Structure formats: structure tokens, C-alpha cells
Image (tube, rainbow, N blue to C red):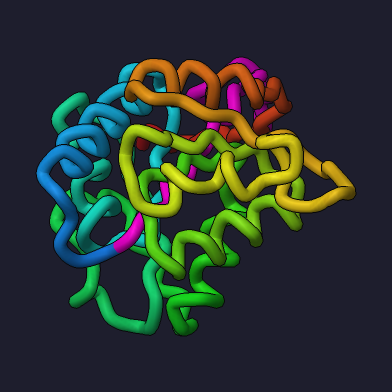
Amino acid sequence: MIYGEKDNITERIGMILIRIGVIGQSGEIPEATCILAEEIGKEIALHGAILLTGGTSGVMGAVSRGAKQANGLVVGILPGDTLEVANEYIDIPITTGLSFDYRSLILVHSSDVIIMIAGGNGTLGELSAAYLNRKPVVIVEASGGWAARVREMAYDGSYLDERKWVKLDYADTAKEAVDIAMSRTYKQEVPVRSVVIKVDNE
């Protein structure tokens, strides 16, 4: 018995899902920030995108919880080699063996677009890394932290330096943030080769 249309290999056109990275601080966060992060996670899932985070607590835990409530797919890019730091909502934990700052670079490079929620110094570094790598970033100003202060320090309110590599976007609500994020990227159609399984009937 042969599954597929050809003897050995069939080809199909598949869709690569959009990967939305969310950056924000770990640890204790204000209740309002937690609620907003959960709403953003839900919106990401409802848009059919994959959520990528640093995989630990705080904003990362809240946005992951929201995504899972809407049956989304959550990927955690973890520091170190252990799963102990991962939050309970991650579907695919990726242990990098790296420190927090280098793990963040993998998160940035693996995302099609970034959403920044609140944030401390580490989140500010991730924002800078995203800008240097020309990744679109949506900053949720209503979430507080550094997200509420970026516009006032940015060049023309929209760039991190005079080179103006990639324009920063701003949002106040979860829906607005994810709608903008989706508009800054696109789904790519690519040929995906799938192996046909042969089963011998004896």
C-alpha cells in the first residue's frame, strides 16, 4: 500500500507560519502588565502565528499562558541546558546552552517580528538587537517600563539611531499590537518535500 500520488516522493506547497517574538522582563510584573501580556498571547494564537519567548517567567509566562488559552503554539528559547527555568505553558522548549543575553540573540534572529511589552535593561538590549538586525518591532507603550519611554528617546520618535534602519511601531492595546505585527511580515509559500510511506502487505 502506498500513501501519496507518486511512487517515492510527493511535493506539496506549504505555508511557513509567522513567528512573533515577545520580549519583556522576567520575575514579578504588575497585574495590569500581566493581563495585557495574556491578551497579546491570545491574539497571537488567534492570528495563527507561533509565539516565541525567552521561556521563563514574568511577561514571558503571562504571554505564553494567554497563547495556550487560545490553543496557540508556544516556543521557549531557554538559557542554559536545563528545562527547570521553563514556564509551564511552553510546547517546544529549546535549550541553548547559552547565557541570558546570548539566548536573547537567538530569540531575535528566530522571530519575523518582535513585540515589546514593558521591560527592564535586558529587554532594552533585546530591542537594540532587533533594531541592529532590522527586525520590525511593535512597542506596547501602555505596558509601562521601557516600552513607555522608547518614543521619547528615539530619533524622530521612530528610530534607534540616525541610520533609520527599521521604523519602530507603537500600540496601546493587544489587538492593535498583533495587527501591526502581522502587517509587518507575511506568510511565505515554499515547496515542502514529503516522503511517501510504503507499506508491504504480505
Q: Residue 131, image x and y in percent?
A: 70, 51
Identify the residue at image location x=61%, y=23%.
14
Is 38 placed left or right of 169 in the picture? left
Q: In which quarter of the image is the C terminus?
A: top left
Q: Nearer the viewer, residue 77 or 33?
A: 33
Start-end of magenta stretch: 2-25
Identify the residue at image location x=49%, y=24%.
3
Is 40 placed left or right of 16 in the picture? left
Q: Of all residues shown, which one is farthest toward the left?
A: 31
Q: Nearer the viewer, residue 150 or 46?
A: 150
Identify the residue at image location x=16%, y=38%.
32
Q: Quadrant of the N terminus?
A: top left
Q: In which quarter of the image is residue 191?
A: top right
- The answer to if 14 sits in the magenta stretch is yes
Q: How many labels does the image show?
A: 0
Is 90 placed left or right of 111 in the picture? left
Q: Quadrant of residue 122?
A: bottom left
Q: Of all residues shown, which one is farthest toward the right?
A: 163
Identify the residue at image location x=56%, y=33%.
196
Is 17 placed left or right of 191 in the picture? left
Q: Residue 45, image x and y in percent?
A: 32, 26
Q: In this view, does 111 lie above or below 180?
A: below
Q: Residue 12, image x and y in percent?
A: 65, 20
